[in-house]
Image: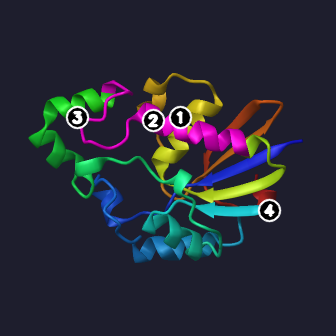
Amino acid sequence: MTSRVYLVSPAMSASTRQARFDDGGSIDQGAVARARAAAGALPPAARVLTSPAVRCRQTAAALGLDGPAVPELAGLDVGRWRGRTLDEVGAAEPEAVGRWLTDPVSAPHGGESVRDLCGRLANWLTDMARTDGRTLAVVEPDVVRAVVVRALGMPDAAFWRLDVPPLTVTELSGRSGRWNLRLGRPPAPRDAD
């Protein structure tokens, strides 16, 4: 049995542009138009899922996708840093930000550590490995990073070394407990692969 998981990162938002920790903001109108233009370009899937984040649900809707918001697919909980920019937090708490960016078990914001996020997504990925067919999930970039880290057996510290552009697809295919990875392609018709 082969399982395929397509992870779609959300379209651009003002928060993304400002390097702001998720504040529940909407995607930009231009981003909505780009997502709508890509609607129908994704492969058909047996299951469509989304992160509970507003920008993920809006991106899914603009892509013409309908599926439940799954709590396990929520982005990294950054606790009291939510809604603030990285520059603001870095100016107020430079040591805490430094620890957070270098130590995967650190959660100085009172939320979730990178290791905890990777563990949560490892459990979800294990469930997906037992699921035949295609799953398409619109999720935060940090969820994509965590899934890739776990799928490839990378150290948690590699999390921050992975870039996930807006409105791109990361594809995993797996069987027998092994995953193969195809990173960050824009949504395109299948014959354009």
Question: Which one is closest to the eye, mark 3 or mark 2?
Answer: 2
Q: Is residue 147 left or right of residue 181?
A: left
The answer to the question of whether label 3 and label 2 lie on touching residues, with beta carbons closer than 8 A, is no
**Residue at point 56% right, 70% down?**
35
Answer whether labels 1 and 3 touch (C-beta < 8 Å). Answer: no
- What whole-number distance in Å separates the C-alpha atoms at marks 1 and 3? 21 Å
Instruction: Name the amino acid type tagged 1.
Output: Gly
- Asked if residue 113 lies in the magenta stretch, the reply is yes
Label 4: which secondary element: loop
Residue tagged 2: 116
Q: Are marks 4 and 3 in contact (CB under 8 Å)?
A: no
Mark 2 is on which residue type? Asp
Q: Which residue is mark 1?
A: 119
Q: Secondary structure at mark 3?
A: helix
Alpha-carbon span between mark 4 and mark 3: 40 Å
Q: CA distance from mark 4 to mark 1?
A: 25 Å
Nearer-N-terminus badge (4/2)? 4
Q: Earlier in the sequence, mark 4 or mark 3?
A: 4
Judging depth in this view, the residue of 131 and 25 nearest the camera is: 131
Residue 28 image position (x, y, % from top left): 39, 72
Tell me if residue 158 comes above or below residue 162 in the rendering.
above
Residue at image position (60%, 74%) is 37
User: Label 4 is placed on what type of residue?
Assistant: Ala
Q: CA distance from mark 3 to mark 2?
A: 17 Å
- In primary-sequence order, the first of circles 4 and 1 is 4
Q: What residue is shown with label 3?
A: 97
Task: Look at mark 4 in the image and give the residue it sits on.
Answer: 46
Q: Mark 1: few, some, or many residues within 10 Å (few <14, many ≥20)?
A: some
Labelled pair 1, 2 in contact (Cβ < 8 Å): yes
Label 4 crowding class (10 Å Cα cut-off): few <14, some 14-19, many 20+? few
Residue 91: percent from left, percent from top: 11, 41
Q: Which stretch appears magenta?
A: 102-127
